[in-house]
Image: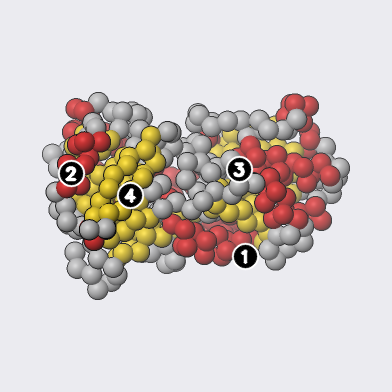
Amino acid sequence: MTMLEISLPYGAHEVFECRVPAERVLIHQRAPEPIDDLPSRLRERLTSPVDFPALSQALLPDDRIVIALDHGTPCAPSLIRGCWEVMAACGVNPADVMIVRPSVCENCDAADPRSELPDDVREQIQLVYHDQSNEKQQAYLAATTSGERVYLAREVVEADFVLCVGTIAYDPVLGFRGTNSVLYPGLSNAEAVRKSHGQGHDELGPNDVRNLRQTIDEVGWLLGVQFTLQVVPAGRGQIAEVIAGAMEAVFQKGKERLTADWLVDADERPELVVVAVDRESEGDDWSSVGAALATARQLVKREGKILVFSDLASPITPGLELIRESRTPRDALQPLRRSAPDDLVVATQVAQAVDRANVYLVSQLDDDLVEDMFMTPIASSDEAMRLLETCQTCAFIESAQHTYGSVKATESQ
């Protein structure tokens, strides 16, 4: 009997290891390898971008430059350092450079994105967290073709050059996150954020048309953004690829690389899906677990089993509290739609997963809380192994928060 050696990194430093008969393993999805020399790759991409001249040719010494930095961008300090090296070579004054981030980033544990800059430069480059509720921080940009008035962070609207820096990633609402999505609604106003709340679209794949994604790209066009720097994630907060250049070309290349690295395409549904959630450089633990559960739910047989490895320790938020207070997970879905809390997406992902399958969770949460969320706590590798032994078919997915799961259309439930 051929045995497969499985090693699943999770959390910040943990690893689950096991040996499983090869014929039982339908999927073994590994994270892509990270770039060995990120500074060199970044210099190369900024010097030879796709469908655009080198970044240095787009900058003038007296430009007021805004770097719109998206939340969850891995290795952000290294990316900012690489961008600044190009700007410095062009004679740009660091006092004329500003990093603008959505307010969701302000309380995360990530390093200051300026931390790798020289001390004198770091002191001059401003870091601003945009407050969507503060009208004084907003400026009118234009109206979209549908007549929607768009307001963005004043610093962005008034800049001479805007550089969007972020991650190409699967997104339950947008299909794909990246390029212009840092601008809207995160750098807009509270009304735009409210309108953007959604539960995702289970009936749509990532490549299907999404109205919000179209609005986002129109906002970028109205602002006149032409150049972007985007990354494709690897595991544990690292980067698998850097892509820079014209917006549309970068977005297309990023989607292609994301599909190659992170699409989990199954021929049939396993009885058990094991997903590992590793620690990101920044981001919300529940969001990562929710994304991993969404992939597992797409793949697993109905009434099957999902085993999640994480070091989740975050308190539950209002939408998750609605699940906890409900008689069944399905009972929470209508109140979630009606109240539309800030964590609507992740709460919906959790509720739908625990409604479809039996979910087992490795975490740092209290066992009673895990059970209140309709999941079974797992405390040891031995317990996980016993669960594995009960299933004839299984799937193993590394860094599952980055993945999108699909099964052939002909496959039954």
Tell me which numbered mark, 2 or 1, is placed earlier along the sequence. 1
Q: Which residue is mark 3?
A: 69
Of callouts 3 and 2, the N-terminal one: 3
Q: Are marks 2 and 1 in contact (CB under 8 Å)?
A: no
Q: Amino acid at mark 1?
A: Ala
Q: From the viewer's perspective, is residue 347 above or below residue 407?
A: above
Nearer to us: label 1 or label 4: 4
Relative placement, left or right, of 243 versus 355 is right
Figure quadrant of residue 14: top left
Secondary element type, mark 2: helix
Local crowd size for mark 3, using a 10 Å CA cut-off: few (<14), some (14–19), many (≥20)? many
Residue occupied by mark 4: 5
Where is residue 96 drawn, in percent x and y? Answer: 78, 37
Which circle marks residue 65 in the picture? none
The answer for how far apart the CA atoms under marks 3 and 1 are is 19 Å
Distance, label 3 to label 2, CA atoms, is 42 Å
Q: Is residue 27 visible?
A: yes
Q: Which residue is mark 1?
A: 249
Instruction: Kindly identify which residue carries mark 2.
Output: 387
